[in-house]
Amino acid sequence: MVWDKDIPTGASFVSQGDNTIRANNAANEAAVDLEHYFATGGTQDGRHKIGIGNDAARDFAIPSPLDGNIWLNTKDYSANGWMILQVYYATGVAWKDTGYLDANVAELDTAQVWSAGQAGTYTTFSTSSSDWNWNCDTSQYFKGTLPDAGTREIQAPTGTLFASNNAGSWTLEVTQAPTTASTLTLDPTYFFPAYGGQPPISTVLGSINMVYVTLRSNSTFFYSVVPA
C-alpha cells in the first residue's frame, strides 16, 4: 500500500484496523528509508544517509558510520570570501574526508590548469610465480625489487583502464636484487620497446631503475627504460 495519513479512519475500532496500521507503518518506513537507514523489524534508529553540519554534530548524529553515509560540512573560508563544502563518506568503520568542494574543483569536460604539484604513492607489484602483476586502475606508480639470481616478467595489467581506445601512462620502479643480479623482462605480447630497442635493467646491485609505459589505442604499451 501507499502511506496514507488518514488510515485508519477515526470511526474504525483498533481491533479492526491493526493490520491496516501495520501496513501503513511499513509504507511510511519505505518512504522514510529513501533518506534514512532502517533494518527489518523492531525499533529503528533511522540514522540519516546524508548529514549536514559541523564535525561534532556529524559524529554525534551518526556515531557508527555505515557504508554509503555521506556528510556535507560547510566551512567559512573567509580569507577568500566564500563558503565551501567539505564532503565525507563512510566506509563502515570511519569517516573519510574527500576534501573541499570550491571554485577550484576539477571538471572532467573542462581544461585544467594546476597551481600545485600533482603526485601519488607507489603500489608494490603482486608476484605470481615469476610474474609481476598490477592493476592500472589503482595507481599511476608501481614498484618491485628483483629476487637474488632470479627473473621477473611484468605482465599486462588488470583494470578497466586497460581497454581498447584508452590512453594513459604509468611509472614502474624496479630495484635490482641486493646480492646477486637478476633479469627483468616485459611480456612481449603487450609491451613494445620505444625507438625499436631499450637498454636492460642495470645489473648494479640495489640500483633503482625506471620503466615508463604508455598505453596505445590497441591495448598494447610502448615502454622506455632508464637504468641506474
Image (cartoon, rainbow, N blue to C red):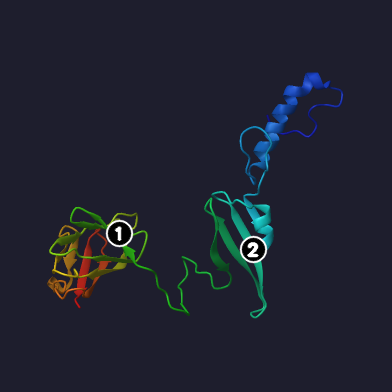
Residue 121 image offset from top left, x and y in percent: 38, 68
Q: Residue at x 30, y 68 (%)?
A: 169
Q: Which quadrant of the view contains residue 103?
A: bottom right
Q: Nearer the viewer, residue 101 or 148?
A: 148
Q: Residue at x 64, y 47 (%)?
A: 35
Image side of residue 14 versus residue 172, left or right: right
Q: Which residue is mark 2?
A: 73
Residue 140 image offset from top left, x and y in percent: 34, 66
Quadrant location of the C terminus in the rendered image: bottom left
Amino acid bearing label 2: Asn
Amino acid bearing label 1: Asn
Q: Which residue is mark 1?
A: 165
Closer mark to the observer between disc 2 and disc 1? 2
SS assignment at label 2: strand
Seen from this angle, which residue lies furthest right?
Answer: 11
Q: Which quadrant of the view contains residue 15?
A: top right
